[in-house]
Amino acid sequence: MAKLSEIEKKLAQMFMLGFKGTELSPGTKSFLNEYQPGGIIYFAQNYETPALLLELSQEIQNTRAKDMNLPLFIAADHEGGKVQRFRKPFIHFPEPVVLGEINSPKLAFQVAEVMANELRAVGVNIDFHPLCDIHTRASNPVIGRRAFGTDEETVSKISSAMVRGFIAAKTVSTVKHFPGHGDTNVDSHFELPRFEMSWEDMLNREIKPFAKAIKGRVDMIMTAHILNTAIDPVYPATLSYETITNKLRKELRFQRLVITDDMQMDAVAKHFGEEEMIALAIQAGCDILLYRNEENGHRAMDTAFRFLKDGKIKAEQVEAAFARIQEVKQRVLLPYVEPTMEGLSVIGCAAHQGILQQVLDKKSLD
């Protein structure tokens, strides 16, 4: 591929992707150097030990374009309970519903700090947590005990406390899955959840935790691949201009980063076309498109570069997204401080064990 133009470099910043292995293969390293995606997401397949993960993060950051002086986002799903990519010695907190049952914003803040400090030690600067989803529907197969509770007040209180904890620990704070995945009965990994709820009803319930997080100056919101026919009868939230731009950006006044949930999930991948949904997500107002593997991410970036040349993706859309990406990276990640092997001692340390024990003690009292 020819050397990226300035606008292509900005478009590349709009992609985050995963890859296989605990070290960079020559092919992956070459791809990162050439395509310059703005972020990487880790999964369990990337983890063996903290030291190896730290070395991997350092190598990834060394591929970044020096002329832009922007570190890569490096993300992971690190919620506690069943959704945690890195095993021991990382502290493993119980599933998030436990924090909702304890109902202590102070402890939730401390849990977020522990998570952030341990992740930062291995070079991870984004935790896709907390959930602002309310576990509204008991039959929901994907949220369940990942949510802090079944009522808006608890979810708002605990998720906002965790956002403050991540911000205090100098990590990119993120909430998910807008506009709320709790009132669905289908898993969006496998099918497109459909429901109908008026925006007014959503404002009174599902949206409240997100609105509180926005007031708390959260850096990033992840979308849900769900179709609410009352808001947009055709497109799920991730691909919906009405949902992302009109509702989230304009009405709720959120001007920071919007990232998609994994674009390879069947909820969107099976219904909207592998190429078409790239343009739709960007036109809807999403700043970062997430792909769980390198092959699909590579193909998506090629498509996006072609769409940019063809005018299907507008330069002004790219400029607006890049401005938001740059603002968060500069504010949270710069000046860039490379994590060190000495810093790994924080993972599973006595102080962190103490926070975990507080959670377990209070859990046993409930």
Image (spheres, rainbow, N blue to C red):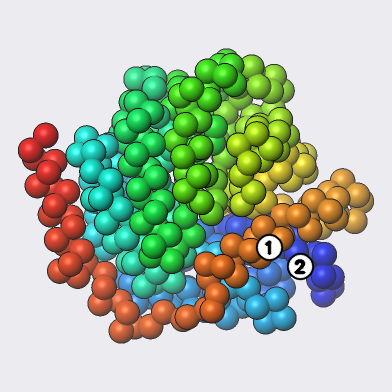
Taking depth in this image into account, of 299 and 256 the one nearest to the observer is 256
What residue is at 30 percent from the left and 53 percent from the top?
Answer: 109
Quadrant in which the N terminus appears: bottom right
Taking depth in this image into account, of 200 and 363 the one nearest to the observer is 200
Residue 248, image x, y percentages:
63, 37
Disc 1 target residue: 13
In the displayed structure, 50 sits above or below 298; it is below
Type of the residue with mark 1: Gln
Disc 2 target residue: 9
Report crowding for label 1: few under 14, some 14 to 19, many 20 or more residues within 10 A (C-alpha).
many
Q: Residue furthest front?
A: 215
- Give the quarter of the image for residue 302: bottom right
Residue 122, image x, y percentages:
39, 72
Taking depth in this image into account, of 337 and 73 the one nearest to the observer is 337
In the displayed structure, 50 sits above or below 17; it is below
Q: Is residue 29 visible?
A: no
Q: Is residue 138 visible?
A: yes
Left or right: residue 283 compared with residue 134: right
Report crowding for label 2: few under 14, some 14 to 19, many 20 or more residues within 10 A (C-alpha).
many
Q: CA distance from mark 2 to mark 1?
A: 7 Å
SS category of the residue bearing label 2: helix
- Give the quarter of the image for residue 281: top right
Instruction: Point out which mark residue 136 bears.
Output: none
SS category of the residue bearing label 1: loop
What residue is at 52 percent from the left and 18 percent from the top?
Answer: 201
Residue 183, image x, y percentages:
45, 22
Quadrant in which the C terminus appears: top left
Q: Does the residue at mark 2 contact the one at mark 1 (Cβ under 8 Å)? A: yes
Type of the residue with mark 2: Lys
What residue is at 58 percent from the left and 57 percent from the top?
Answer: 17
Left or right: residue 280 compared with residue 170: right
Residue 246, image x, y percentages:
70, 33
